[in-house]
Image (cartoon, rainbow, N blue to C red):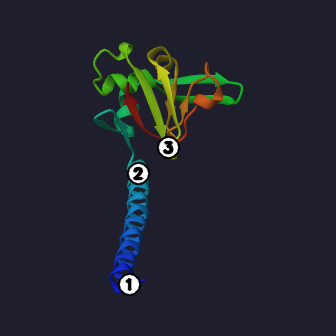
Amino acid sequence: MEKTEKIVLIIAIFLLSMGLTSGIYIEKATDENEKTFIADGYLKVEDSFLTLNKIFSNCTNNIRITDRGNYSGVSLSCVINISNIQNPELHDYAIIGLDGYTKTVSWMDMKKGILTNDRYAVFAHLPRAYWIKDVLRIEVH
């Protein structure tokens, strides 16, 4: 190998390692920010940042009875309504957990589902695969 080829190879390896290192750092920083976001009691709904205190003080508490026990929380439709989404019945909603797990549901499902104080989205009428723990945000589709 010539001297210039060795230099190019060293530079390429250096750039690849820098890209990998920065990618890992950005992912870790994002994870930490999301954990802080949850610890501080926020829920992002489309472009709105709602505190859990605002959600639970503005929405009526409901109980859902399931084969896995009873769950208490506020209607997910109320969460959407206080976030000022226009024509909520015309949209579907992606509920995203801290671990990235996502399920998309209809407005009718949102009307039947609840958000517990532990950030657990419970849909008693849907298969358990639709229940999301550590809800981080809700996206409108």
Q: Quadrant of residue 27?
A: bottom left
The disc placed on residue 25 is none
Amino acid identity at mark 1: Glu
Q: CA distance from mark 3 to mark 2?
A: 11 Å
Viewer-nearest residue: 53 or 1: 1
Vertical arrangement, residue 14 with respect to residue 110, above or below? below
The image shows residue 45 at horizontal and vertical percentages of: 35, 33
Q: Upstream in the sequence, badge 3 or badge 2?
A: 2
The image shows residue 104 at horizontal and vertical percentages of: 49, 26
Question: Can you see residue 51?
Answer: yes
Vertical arrangement, residue 117 with respect to residue 63, above or below? below
Q: Secondary structure at mark 3?
A: loop
Q: What residue sits right under mark 3 in the picture?
A: 100
The disc placed on residue 34 is 2
Vertical arrangement, residue 132 with respect to residue 64, above or below? below
* Position of residue 17 in the picture relative to residue 129 (left or right): left
Q: What residue sits right under mark 1 in the picture?
A: 2
